Amino acid sequence: MKQDNLRNVAIIAHVDHGKTTLVDRLLSACKVFRENQQVEERVLDSNDQERERGITILSKNIAINYKGTKINVIDTPGHADFGGEVERVLNMADGALLIVDAFEGPMPQTRFVLRHALDLGLRIVVVINKIDRPGARPDEVLDEVFDLMVELNATDEQLDFPVVYASAVNGYARYEADDGNDDMIPLLDTIVKEIPAPECEPDAPLALQICTVDHSSFVGRIGIGRLHSGTMHQNEPVLIIKNDGTRYNTIIKQVFTFANLEKKEQTEVAAGDIIAVVGVEDADIGDMVTSREHPVRLAPIKVEEPTMAIVFQASDSPIIGQDGDIVGGRQLRERLMREAESNISMRISELEDKSGIEVAGRGVLHLSVLMETMRREGFEFQVGRPRVIIKEDEKGHKLEPIEEATVEVPSEYAGKAIEVFGTAGGEMADMAAKGDQTHLVFKIPARGTMGLRTKLLNATRGEATMFHHFSEYGPFRGDFSGRKNGSMISMSTDKSVAYALDSLQQRGTLFIGPGEECYEGMIVGQSAKEGDMVVNIAKSKSLGNQRTSSADKAIQLTPPVRFTLEEALEYIQDDELVEITPTHIRLRKRILSTTDRKKANKRN
């Protein structure tokens, strides 16, 4: 039977195409907020990092009521590094709103998520957003979306998709781009009309597959998923079937559905709805909650494998413990193993020699979000250079992850962009002119993407935009040359002095300013030449009783280069580490002592 008063819809879009703002407007249109209520912009981006970076990292569930129909809305991340979130939450939906910018058109991340939605057979509603934007070209963008769907092997039924034109920031949706409507009603009507109601059997055996795991300090783990069949009751005895096939009995203590921005406790819920359950203590993604008498097992949730790994270690910095509260290796291990329980798209395992924990994820951004979360929790730790995960085929040939990179660049800089990609092992797959912009597509090893954005921006004077996502595993393309410039390395543990930095800035680029705490082996800058140089950052001016002509000359220091976490990870070499604390990101050598480094170099 169909649950006609219910719709489950996912919202998918490329980063910054207005997805979260559109959800804000749907909430307002359904009178979720009181008229005098103060509401933050992008209400679903509740995580600090989501607000700061302007991207959705974690999938969210909300529900709105429109004309007697409950619409479960699943907000999904737009960045391919968080594709693990997207792949599993789409299992809860019957349809999807595909939001595309009326100026930019479909982008690489749009393709990535749309492919998964089409494979699952979801009904697609295309929303062409930002039609008020200067240079908007809604008709051309609609043609591009159609071409993309054909390319992704959409069925004839999926190609017959409805279209809504919108300006989320101005709060209106329209059936035609210029029909003058000024509210969101056309979009809500289209969702109710076009997204199919869930088909389910409330009297069949219970079947719930957990797609997301939430955590509460009061009740522990909360399993979230779509109830495919049966009716879930509070205090119901159920069977849990784990991903590895193990089974055990438990009792569901509480059952929640989603209402507006919150969870609402229920005594029973019929099939078709998205629910949250308390009582599955070790709930994992993909676990089945089912009837003890007639167990049901659905197809496992498939998630693409990680392509990049990094080793986390307890910090052994000489100035450890000045910023963070949590510095021990045991606490670091416990925190990462906790992450492994809820983050299905990461692989986390301890190294055989117990020297650190290897964390494998989708890319540098995916890994850096975890690091940023941990440093905000008060952790101090250090990480090595990210490495790509190499596989072997049946014949023993090495395979490495290949990314598809898409670049939009002013035509005058297209040659420079191609040159930058050529030095990083990229091969051009497509090139097309779009007005005064050139659209370039490259196949490039994941190793080559590290530090590539910075090189590309430098070569194109900041005019290029680049997106990349995992494409496939391909033949290993040999070794690349690393960073040519050497490092400036502090020779002592001391505070930096402006007088010393003044002379050092003539020999390279500084990463620190005056008065900063440094230690032996810490990287304080980049040398203008090849090869590392050990420097004295605490050298002060010798004071005599004679006055020189330069005595009163004020020292003028160039502002130091400050790395973001992603930039630092992409910058370091194999013999270097990034030290991460709640307030600092420092670069350092693995071996801090100058003498020990020389001995190690001789042995090698």
Image: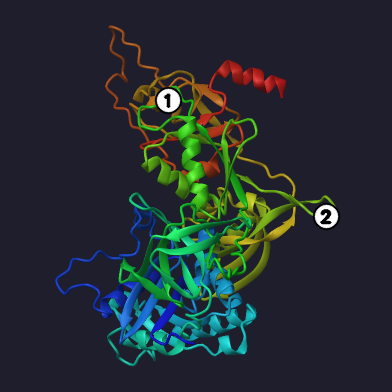
Mark sitting on residue 352: none
Dot 2 amino acid type: Glu
* Nearer-the-camera pick, 5 or 149: 5
Residue tagged 1: 503
* Nearer-the-camera pick, 50 or 135: 50
* Nearer-the-camera pick, 112 or 299: 299
Residue 19 falls left or right of residue 535: left
* Residue at the outermost right position: 395
Q: Earlier in the sequence, mark 2 or mark 1?
A: 2
**Above-or-below relation of 328 to 186:** above
Give percent across and percent down for residue 428. 67, 64
Residue 414, located in which quarter of the rendered image? bottom right
Q: Is residue 102 visible?
A: no
* Residue at the outermost front position: 293
Give percent across and percent down for residue 297. 60, 68
Residue drawn at x 54%, y 90% is 160
Q: Are marks 2 and 1 in contact (CB under 8 Å)?
A: no
Residue tagged 2: 394
* Nearer-the-camera pick, 522 or 256: 256
Give percent across and percent down for residue 187. 37, 85
